[in-house]
């Protein structure tokens, strides 16, 4: 048997094994949690390698943290919370005033911690509350501190009626050489029951090989 024929046969067997895993997962009703492992199997069969995932978020009220946890539950990867040196006030009305001032002035607050080996990540989920129609200032600080060239950014937001707002456009301005995928926006009041919506969004991305395979 020639090397070319042997390689083709092995590839065919790998695809058959992958299909068996997918069907088994669907029949068992556990397809969503299998996506990271299926992608890893596919990567091993094709030699493409699995992309390294980082989930980054800023959350003052806990809403965006909840969605970040739901994403992490489905796709795995590393987890990083953006924290500011000077915390925002507890009073929401005060936060609104400060957020407006920050947006008007372009102020970017100092951050407490940094991501180690940021260069090693391929896909970065970026989570933010929507403040005055766009990303929160701490997220602007984070996006400005790292080189996102060639990296895939997947935005997710929590909001009170603005949806994604101008977040995608503003992320694009801050990271012009990145690959920016379609994001998801979750109402703040619905975060506790958003797992199905988040899972469906992730499944769609996984079917398009957006997160795990080139």
Image (cartoon, rainbow, N blue to C red):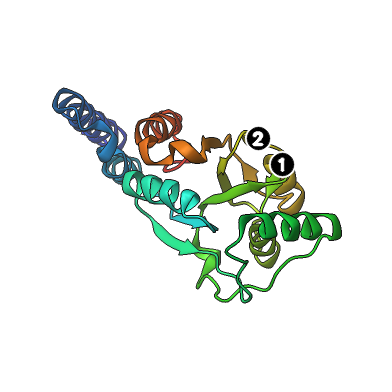
Q: Identify the residue position indicated by label 1 in the image.
A: 133
**Residue extending furthest right?**
105
Q: Position of residue 139 (x, y in %)?
A: 64, 58
Q: Tag on residue 7? A: none
Q: Position of residue 200 (x, y in %)?
A: 39, 29
Mark 2 to mark 1 CA distance (whole Å): 6 Å
Q: Residue at x 21, y 25 (%)?
A: 26
Taking 45 as reference, is 111 above or below it? Answer: below
Left or right: 144 in relation to 202: right
Q: Residue at x 52, y 36 (%)?
A: 187
Q: Secondary structure at mark 1?
A: loop
Taking 13 as reference, is 213 above or below it? Answer: below
Q: Identify the residue position indicated by label 2 in the image.
A: 162
Instruction: Check whether the beta carbons of the residues at disc 2 and disc 1 lie within 8 A of each other.
Output: yes
**Disc on the earlier residue, 2 or 1:** 1
Q: Around disc 1, counting alpha carbons within 10 Å, would you say few (fewer than 14), some (14 to 19), or many (20 or more)?
A: some
Q: Around disc 2, counting alpha carbons within 10 Å, would you say few (fewer than 14), some (14 to 19), or many (20 or more)?
A: some
Quadrant in the picture for residue 14: top left
- Assign the N terminus to one quadrant of the image: top left
Q: Position of residue 117 (x, y in %)?
A: 51, 71
Q: Position of residue 38 (x, y in %)?
A: 27, 39
Q: Nearer the viewer, residue 188 or 17?
A: 188
Left or right: 86 in relation to 190: right
Q: Residue at x 45, y 53 (%)?
A: 65
Taking 91 as reference, is 161 above or below it? Answer: above
Q: Nearer the viewer, residue 122 or 138?
A: 138
């Amino acid at each position: 048997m020639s090397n070319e024929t042997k390689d083709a046969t092995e590839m065919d067997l790998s695809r058959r094994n992958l299909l068996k895993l997918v069907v088994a997962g669907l029949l068992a009703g556990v397809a969503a949690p299998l996506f990271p492992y299926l992608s890893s199997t596919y990567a091993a069969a094709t030699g493409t390698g699995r992309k390294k995932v980082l989930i980054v978020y800023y959350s003052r009220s806990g809403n965006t943290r909840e969605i970040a946890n739901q994403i992490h539950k489905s796709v795995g990867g590393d987890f990083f919370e953006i924290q500011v040196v000077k915390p925002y006030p507890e009073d929401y009305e005060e936060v609104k005033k400060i957020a407006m001032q920050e947006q008007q002035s372009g102020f970017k607050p100092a951050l407490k911690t940094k991501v180690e080996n940021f260069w090693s990540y391929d896909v970065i989920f970026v989570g933010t509350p929507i403040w005055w129609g766009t990303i929160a200032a701490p997220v602007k600080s984070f996006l400005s501190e790292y080189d996102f060239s060639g990296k895939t950014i997947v935005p997710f937001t929590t909001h009170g009626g603005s949806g994604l707002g101008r977040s995608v456009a503003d992320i694009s301005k801050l990271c012009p050489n990145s690959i920016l995928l379609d994001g998801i926006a979750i109402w703040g009041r619905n975060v506790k029951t958003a797992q199905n919506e988040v899972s469906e969004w992730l499944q769609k991305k996984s079917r398009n090989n957006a997160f795990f395979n080139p």
